[in-house]
Amino acid sequence: MRRNQVAVVGAAETTKLGVIPDMSQIQLHADAALNAIADAGLKLSDIDGVATAVETPQQIAHYLGITPTWVDGTSVGGCSFMLHVRHAAAAIEAGLCKTVLITHAESGKSMIGKQPRSTPADSLNGQFEAPFGVYGPPSMFPIPVLRYMKTHGITHEQIAMVAVVQREWAAKNPRATMKDPITVEDVLNSRMIAYPFRLLQCCLVTDGGGALILTSADRAKDFPLKPVYILGIGESVESPMVSQMETFNSSRAFKVAGPLAFKEAGIAHKDVDHLMIYDAFAHLPLFGLGDLGFMPHEETGKFIADGNTRPGGKLPLNTNGGGLSYMHSGMYGMYALQESVRQMRGIAPAQVKDAKISVCHGVGGMFAASGTIIFTNEK
Amino acid sequence: MAEAQRARPKPTPETQHFWDGTQAGELRLQRCDACDHVYFPPRPFCPSCASRKVSIFKSSGKGKLYSYVINHRPAAPGFTPPYAIAVVELDEGPRMMTNIVDCPQTPEALELDMKLEVKFEKLDDKITLPLFHPAKG
């Protein structure tokens, strides 16, 4: 990919976030898509590329009334939308389509028009993980944490601070689900979910969605809002079985995707003004800071506990409040992307002053997949 | 009403030898004849060098506790919380998910790197699960 050849020209979330009992999952997709199309000042007929996950591109295209010449149904968990951005950028550059709509939505709380996730008994996960009592992400995603803490000397209090700091960001965001301040003691005294993690270290479960519209940079200047350019992108996958990760001391998928994006962007870590690291659970920002190369893993816990990522800190992280406090419908990557775009447009509720480069890092299917997007508002 | 049952694995042609092994009281791994790589989960080729010449062998059944969670909620069907979901690192190298039995399900009792040994638990006439307990002595 060449730098800054493709831009985000439309971005929106569903009209409501949180508990939305009056919309099915596919309608949440449509609500987000229509909002993004309006944001870009486009007509439905302008869209010739469609990407989505869980729901299929044919479902979304037909429901909206779009006839695409390019689709992508990559569905690798919560970072699928980061991968869609990469694939869409390549497709636009290759001339396969001109204007791509990427949608996410999930009726994660109300469960309307949503198939429950299932693990076939003859899949590898069904044979070699399910029989041992894993039951949903809270029982799987934190399995590496104790090893990570022991190897890198990270404390329970430091990981609790991830939730505390993100609540500080959420307090600035009228659309955040949880806004009341919390302390380390609150986190460490909240209900136990899966030791070492307690309720306030686990993401919310909500309804909602979001959509992005991408086009070539040379067309982007004609759109109503300031384009947000794609400076660098990376993706990778590891294993759908958390027990089979190469190591619990880092994520291989992070370590491949992140550096690819930085290399393509041609930037150094000190150039990053704003950072999003998908936080389904409180350990993920630590893994992200280490594996993306911001600092050694040993320093990540102290870096957050010392306040470097809080409002006013030197590396603003998860400025919408994150999956822990903003919202989390099940596949949070789209909301991280939306916040990066808002920050680059200069319209975020907790706007980072003069931010020019935003890194948005996603994870999917526990540590199965990863995508990193580096955005800029300068060409 | 019948009690909710623990998720039951369904073997495939590529994994049948593993589940036959646990029924026979053996924890079976695979080793590549070409590059000596030992691997899990089962497959009829080496994920390191792609050779299809691989052998099945009996693991020592010994390993150490690599990491775990103690799950409180939601509990999987057939489990009474709190229960530990663990990953054991076998002496031969591969890691696998398991449960730790004959041991309190507490952070104090479950120390990372503690030595473990396999213990087979019969689920029904066709499936026996490889669980682990603290090594004796």
Image (spheres, coloured by chain):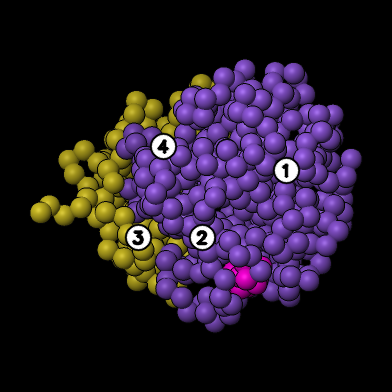
Chain colours: A purple, B yellow
Q: Secondary structure at mark 4?
A: helix
Q: Amino acid at mark 2?
A: Cys
Read off the residue under disc 3: B74
- Tell me if label 3 and label 4 are in contact, CB under 8 Å: no
A362, A11: nearer the viewer: A11
Number of the front mark, 4 or 1: 1
Rounded to the nearest angstrom, the CA distance separating label 3 from label 2 is: 14 Å
Task: Residue A161: say if magenta.
Answer: yes
Of tags 1 and 3, the one toward the viewer is 1
The location of residue A7, given as percent across then percent down, is 77, 36
- Contact between marks 1 and 3 (CB within 8 A): the answer is no
Q: Is residue B25 visible?
A: no
Specify the label residue A373 is tagged with: 1
**Amino acid at dot 4:** Leu
Residue B10's x, y, as percent? 29, 35
Question: Is circle 3 on the same chain as circle 4?
Answer: no
Magenta residues span: A160-171
Q: Earlier in the sequence, mark 2 or mark 1?
A: 2
**What residue does disc 2 label?**
A203
Q: Is residue B116 magenta?
A: no
Q: Is residue A116 above or below residue A151?
A: above
Taking depth in this image into account, of A217 and A262 the one nearest to the observer is A217
Residue that badge 4 annotates: A124
- The reply to whether callout 2 and callout 4 are in contact (CB within 8 Å) is no
Chain of the residue displaying label 1: A
Quadrant assignment, res A151: bottom right
- Which residue is located at x 69 percent, y 62 percent? A349
Residue A378, quarter of picture? top right
Amino acid carrying label 3: it is Pro
Residue A23 in the figure: left or right of residue B122: right
Residue at image x 89%, y 40%?
A379
